[in-house]
Image (cartoon, helix red, strand yellow):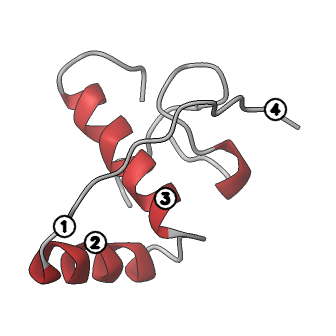
Amino acid sequence: MVELNRGERLQIMLTEEELTALDDWRFDRRMPSRAAAIRELLKRGLAAEGKVVGGRTQSKQYGVTEQGTTPIDDAG
């Protein structure tokens, strides 16, 4: 099992529309939490910019940096 050290907290404010879009995306992909969905979207955005090697991960592996992540599955 990958042990992630998430020592930093990031607080963001979302509009009701943004939150609905996030929740819809999350539920369509059966993601375990909003935080996992946000990390996955961030990881995909960074991968699109060439910053992270992207694949399918288990919920316990959701992370943005390479320390616990696997490539992004573009089919999702």
Earlier residue among tags 1 and 4: 4
Q: Amino acid at mark 3?
A: Ala
Earlier residue among tags 3 and 1: 1
Earlier residue among tags 3 and 4: 4
- Kind of element beneath mark 3: helix
The quadrant where residue 16 appears: bottom left
Q: Is residue 58 above or below residue 6?
A: below
Q: Amino acid at mark 2?
A: Leu
The quadrant where residue 29 appears: bottom left
What count of labels does the image hold? Answer: 4
CA separation, marks 3 and 1? 13 Å
Q: Which residue is mark 1?
A: 14
The quadrant where residue 37 appears: bottom left
Q: Amino acid at mark 1?
A: Leu
Earlier residue among tags 2 and 1: 1
**Mark 4 and mark 1 in contact (Cβ < 8 Å)?**
no
In the rendering, which numbered label is found on residue 22?
Answer: 2
In the rendering, which numbered label is found on residue 3?
Answer: 4
CA separation, marks 4 and 2? 26 Å
Q: At 42% across and 20% down in the image, what residue appears?
A: 53
CA separation, marks 1 and 4? 29 Å
CA separation, marks 2 and 1? 10 Å
Q: Nearer the viewer, mark 1 or mark 4?
A: 1
- Kind of element beneath mark 1: loop
CA separation, marks 3 and 2? 10 Å
Q: Which residue is mark 3?
A: 35
Q: Is residue 1 above or below residue 13?
A: above
**Mark 4 and mark 3 in contact (Cβ < 8 Å)?**
no
